[in-house]
Amino acid sequence: MLIDPRALTGCRHRVHLDTAHPGTVANVPEDIGVQQRRESARAYREATRERLMAGGAHTWVHITPDAPASERAAATMRACEEGVDRIWGAVLPLEFDTGRRARSELLVRDADRGGYVPVIVVNHKVTDPGSGAVTSGLDEWAPATDPTRKVRAQLRDQFRLAQIYRMLQTHGHASPAALGGAIGYGGECILVHDLAAIMDQYDERFEDRLAVARGERATAPSQVGECRSCPWWPDCSAVLTDARDVSLVATGSRAEVLRGVGVRTIDALAAWEGPAPEEWQGDGFADTVVLAKAWLAGIPLVRRRPDVTVVRADVEVDVDMESYQEHGAYLWGTLLTEAGVAQPYRPFVTWDPVPTSDEARSFAEFWTWLTGTLEATLAAGKTFAAYCYSRSAEDKWLLDSATRFAGMPGIPTVAQVKTFINGPHWVDIYQAVSEQFICPNGKGLKKIAPVAGFRWRDAEASGEASMSWYCDAVGYDGEPDLDQRERLFVYNEDDVRATKVLREWMTDRAVAEVPLASEL
């Protein structure tokens, strides 16, 4: 029985199901989001390899991915024994006795102490602005405290590095420094992890997962974030629903806290009186009790307070942006409404595959139109508001576009963008929903807008599905598919119209249609 590092931070019950019933879900279509993340990670790793190996300052061995795993493992061990500076695509020999298997994008030879330091390449952020992280440059292994970065906690990366390190130890090729590294999204440096600090935690977690895989420890389903893309979820969901399990309204570690005080069902949680359990992390326990009551009553939305308010204006613009991974924002969709009358949907788009300089043109046209509408409205003595749903993505790409295309025609400065997004005319309907409603089924637009009566025209519409449509629309793997372009327009238009319908419903009907929490 072999344990992959990803199992160490994933669902324990899934480890049991995958090992006890191999092949049962083999033909279940993989979640599209998982597919896209895997492909994006593969492309990022390959781009990183090309970038690192282009320097030519080290002796390299590239373990090509085409050979069988056993041959790649043998080639990795030969390279380690020869003492080459850097090994790309390293595969460690399977350890059937310990149950370990692992691979590392990069092994860096420790020139001072001997042995190798494992370095993984991941398509997520590993640092944030700040100070205190230990980093190394990409070309030379020289760990030092970084005054510009702080660590973004990623236990999955640390456990993966710990497993690789344990396997390097088995073969006598681990650096005595007990360090590991991660090249995250952006690829500007290597974040250095002190593996000695987490080895005890890793060993305990590995021992637990191995025992689960060998059938030595029992598990039971419990809803966690991973469930959304797990092929076993339909079966687990049915079991949890029949049991009215508390994890359906208090997911992850919160469910474990509740079980620890004897609350195992939604019914028991709904009947709770008094303060939160001592082990409860953060705020929101009172909301969780309300969620339990709403679940039992089949209520999709609950008001926090008697009134419901949302910013309204004489001229209103609903905005929704579409991006492709981290490559760029290719579409800014808008819907302008004045005096209650909506104009036709207006998209600002580039169909050149991102990243592309044509993205600057479409973004500049969008920004010029939006700010021009704002200025003309205010000059006429009227009020103006632009709306989005969950502003983090729009804010990111507004700022990113201003940075990447600085100085090009029509591109605003970063300061101008910050003035707009921090000003009174940029309204996040997600925030308004979060402040005024408790949402048993989630706060996503596709969960909330149907309560207001909105329906998407495309039954498969989702942000992750749109990524695949985009690949076809721009012809990443063939000729551009014009039907998929139209599909993306329909999807984006429905998103902006859903935002409009939702905010109008909040103004006109929400109080009458949604029960108050205190009334449950």
Image (cartoon, rainbow, N blue to C red):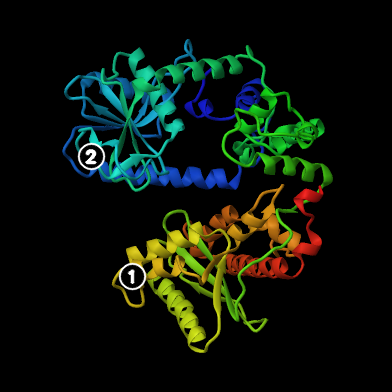
- Callout 2: SS: loop
> In the rendered view, would you say 506 is above or below 114?
below
User: Looking at the image, is 78 positioned above or below residue 142?
Assistant: above
- Rounded to the nearest angstrom, the CA distance separating label 2 from label 1 is 30 Å
Is tag 2's residue or tag 1's residue first in the polypeptide sequence?
2
Q: Can you give x and y, in whole percent of width and height, for residue 400 in the image?
A: 38, 61
Q: Position of residue 64 (x, y in %)?
A: 35, 34
Please report contact status of discs 2 and 1: CB closer than 8 Å, yes or no: no
Residue drawn where x is 40% and y is 34% of the image: 66
Q: Position of residue 450 (x, y in %)?
A: 73, 60
Q: Amino acid at mark 1?
A: Thr
The secondary structure type at the circle numbered 1 is: loop
Residue labelled with disc 1: 413
Q: Residue at x 43, y 54 (%)?
A: 326
Q: Is residue 223 at least partly visible in the picture? A: yes
Please, is residue 305 above or below residue 387 in the view?
A: above
Check the image and report above or below for 338 versus 477.
below
Q: Which mark is residue 272?
A: none
Nearer to the camera, 369 or 253: 253
Direction right: furthest residue? 297
**In the orientation shown, which residue stands out farthest toward the front?**
274
Numbered disc in front, either 2 or 1: 1
Residue 168 position in % (x across, y down):
34, 18
Would you name the residue on which mark 2 appears? Answer: 137
Q: Nearer the viewer, residue 499 or 15?
A: 499
Q: Quadrant of residue 124?
A: top left
Residue shown at the point (45%, 63%) measured from the top left: 329
> Seen in the image, is 170 located left or right of residue 110?
right
Occupied quadrant, residue 383:
bottom right
